[in-house]
Image (cartoon, coloured by chain):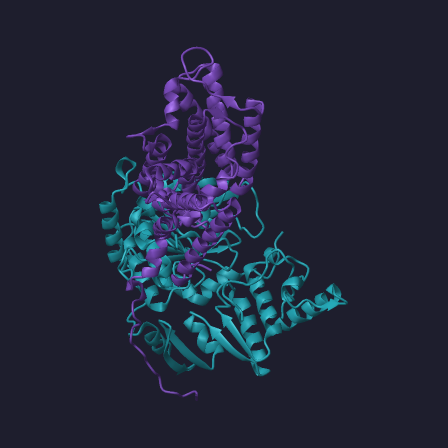
Chain colours: A cyan, B purple
Amino acid sequence: MIFQELDLVPGLDVTANLFLGRELTRAGVLDRATMRREARSRLETVGVEIDVDQPVGELSVGRRQIVAIAKALTYASRILVMDEPTAALTAAEVERLFAVMREIAGRGVGIVYISHRLEEVPRVADRVTVLRDGQVAGIAPASAPQSELVRLLVGRPLAELYPRRSGEFGRSVLRLEHASFRPRNTRAGWQAPVDISLEVRAGEIVGLAGIMGAGRTELLTALYGAAGAGAWSGAVEIDGAPAYLSSIRGARAEGLGLVTDDRRGSGLMLRDSVGRNLVLTVLRRVSPFFLMSRAREAELAREAIHAFDVRPALPEVPVGALSGGNQQKVVLAKEVLGGPRLLLLDEPTRGVDVGAKGEIYARIRELAGKGLGVLIASSEMPELIGLCDRVIVLRRGRTVAEFPGGADEHEVLAAAETNEGQTHG
Amino acid sequence: MDDAAPLRDISSAPPAAWRRIDLFAIAVRFQSVIGLVLVAMGGVIFSPRRHGIILFLAPDNIANIVRAVSETGIIAVGMTFVIITAGIDLSVGALLSLSSVLTATIMTTAGWGLIPTVLFVVACGALFGAIQGGISTRFRLEPFIVTLAGLQVARGLALVISNNQYINISYGEGPGLAPPVFAILGDRLFNNVVPVATLVFVVVAAIATFVLNFTRFGRYVFAVGGNERAARLSGVPVTLVKVSVYAITGLVSAIAGIVHAGQFNFGSANDGTGYELTAIAAVVIGGTSLFGAAGSMVGTVAGAMMLGALANILQLNNINAALQLLATGAIIVLAAVLQSLVRRREGLGR
C-alpha cells in the first residue's frame, strides 16, 4: 500500500525505512551491510539513484515518494494499492513511475491505482471504477471518454469545468519588480523567491506554474509574511504603494489573504463547527467591545455558506465531518469573509472531487469579477491554463516565463522544466 | 468482469449522517455534570445516618465539600484555558504556596493593607505565569517542561521567603498584625452556611465562564487549541493568547493562595503539593480534551465538585485515603475513554 501522505519516518535513513519492521538480523544484531546492499538494488529496480544512507527527511517529496514505492514493492507479492502516488511528482518522475508500474504489472502484480487526475487514468489503467459518496458509481473501460468519467464522478454531465474569462482588469493590486525574499535562516528544501517580477491586477487571476520545489508555495507564504523571519528586497507594491510584508498581521492589514495547500493542517479547526471556522478571520467584526455577537456571527456564517454553497448548509456541523471539497469551500469562504483585495491560493483544489472543483473555479472567477486580484499556485497544469488569465512560470525561485491563459500545456511545462537536469551551484 | 462492461450508474444519495442527534455525544459532553449527579445520589444512598438525618446532605457537610474544593476549583478554572490551547501548567500548586507565603509575609511584616496586598500578590502570580508562557512561546519549548521548571522555582522562592517555616497570621491593629477583615476568608456567610472561599470560587468561575464563551479572547483560546497554524494564518495573535492563558493560571493560583492563607491563617512553602494534578483531573473529567480545542467551564466546575463530593462520601464511610486515590484514578480514565469514544464516532480522532 502506498499512501498519498507518505508513511515514512523522516529521521531514519532510506535503508532503515525500506526495512522498517522487517529488519534483517544476524544473530539478533542488525545486519546493516546486507540491508544497504538490498536497498540499493531495490531502488535500482525503480530506476532512481538515491543515497541509501541519507535521512528520508532530507529528500525532496518526489524522491520520498519513490522510496515509499520501493518500500511497498518489496512488500507486494500480488496486489499493490497506490493512493494518489503522483500528487507530488514532476512530469518526468510521473513517467518513470508509470514505466515502473507497467513493468511490475507485466510481472503479474495487480495494481489498484487511486487518482483524482482523470487525464492520467487511461494512461495506466486497464479498467476504471468510479466511486462517489462511498459507492461504486460505475465501472468503465479505460478507453471511455473523459466526459463519461466526469459524468459518473459528479452524477450529472458537467457542462464547463472552467468559467469564462472577462478580460477586463483594473488597477494593479500587487506588483513585484526584481523582488527577492531573504530568509534569516536558510532551510534545506526551502526555495526562497529570487528576482521575482510579476503583477496582479484587480479582477485578474494569475497562475504560478512550476515543478515541485520551484518555489511556488514559498513565494505565496513569503508574500503573506508566513515564511518565518526574513526580509523582501526590490520593489514590492500593494495597490501602488510600497509594502513591507514581514508579518502575517501586517500582510492581512494590507489586504492579503492566503489559503494554504493543507486545509487540514493549516486551514481548519477540524473539531470546531463550520460557523466558528468561517468567522475566524472576522472575529473583530463580530465582537464589538470584545464581546462576541452570536447574531452577527450566525448571519455572516449563513451568508458565507450560501455564497459558497457549502453542503450541508448547517453552520453547527463539525467541519472535519465535511467532504474535502466542502472543507475547501469553507477555507476559501473564511478568507473571503476577511475582505481581502488580493487572494493567494496554494493548490486550491488539492484532494477535491471534480464537481466541487468546478464550483470552486466559478467562485474564484466570481470573486475576481468583483475586483479581487487572485494569485494561484498549482501543480495541475490544466487547472492553471483553464482558469487563469495569465500563467507565470517559476524555476528555482525565479520568474522565468509568462503565458496567456489557454496557452499550450506542453509549452508551459517545457518552460518549467528546462535545465532541470543540470545542477546549479 | 470483462473490459467492455456497460457503464453503471448509482445515483442514490447516502443518508445525511450529521443530522442524527447523537445522544451519546451529548451525554459525554455533560459527563461531569451527570457524574456529579450520580456521585451525589450515591452519597445519599451510602451516607451514614444519625438520628434519621442523612449526614451527606447536612448543611455542614455540604459546606465542607464546597469549601474543600474551592482552592483546587479556582485553579482548575484557570487550567481550563491553558488545556483548551493544548497546553498544560504544572506550576499552579507551587504558585499557590508561594502566594500564601507572600500574602502572609507582606501582611505581617510589611504592614500593607488588604487591598494592596491582594493586588500585589495577584499581579505577581499573573507575571509569573506570563513569564512561563513567554519562555514557552519564545523558545518553542513544551509548556510541560517550562512549567515543571516553574514549579521548582516557585517552590524554591517560597522556601527562601518563608525560611521554610509557617508564617502565622495574627489579626489586629498595629505592627506585625494583619487587617482583621482578611480573616473573613475562613468564615461562612448567610447563617453560617456558605464559606467565603466558595464564594470566591463561584465568582472566579462565573467570570471565567463569561470570558471563555462570550468574548473574543475566549474564541481566540479555542482557535489556538483547534489549529494553531490556522489561527496564526487567520490573524489571531497566537503568541499573545498563549502568554495570556498562562498569566491566567498564574493569576488564579495567586487568588487560590490568598484564599489558602486566609482560611488557615498562615503561609506555608509546603502546601498545595499535588494541587496541579487535582486541577488537571477536574478539567479532564469536565470534558476538556488534553489535545485542545474542546472544553467547557461548566464541565470543569462540575468535575471539581464531583471529585470533592466523592472524597467526602468516602471519608464519611471511613474508607481510607488509598482507596480514594484508586477511585479518582478510575474516574479519570473513564472520563478520558468516553471522550475518545465520542471522537472516534465523529470520525475526528484516532
Q: Position of residue A77 (x, y in %)?
A: 60, 78
Quick one: B330 or A69, which is closer to the camera?
B330
Whether residue A218 is situated above or below residue A382 in the rendered picture: above
Most extreme residue toward the top is: B174
Residue in the image at 51% along x and 72% along y: A82
Location of residue B210 by image quarter: top left
Q: Position of residue B21 (x, y in %)?
A: 29, 62
Please give left or right for residue A92 compared with residue A293 in the image. right
Location of residue A381 by image quarter: bottom left
Most extreme residue toward the right is: A27
* Quarter of the N terminus of chain B within the rendering: bottom left
Please give left or right for residue A184 compared with residue A118 in the image. right
| Residue B201 visible in the displayed image | yes
Q: Position of residue A175 (x, y in %)?
A: 39, 45
Whether residue B66 is situated above or below residue A6 in the rendered picture: above
Residue in the image at 29% along x and 76% along y: B12
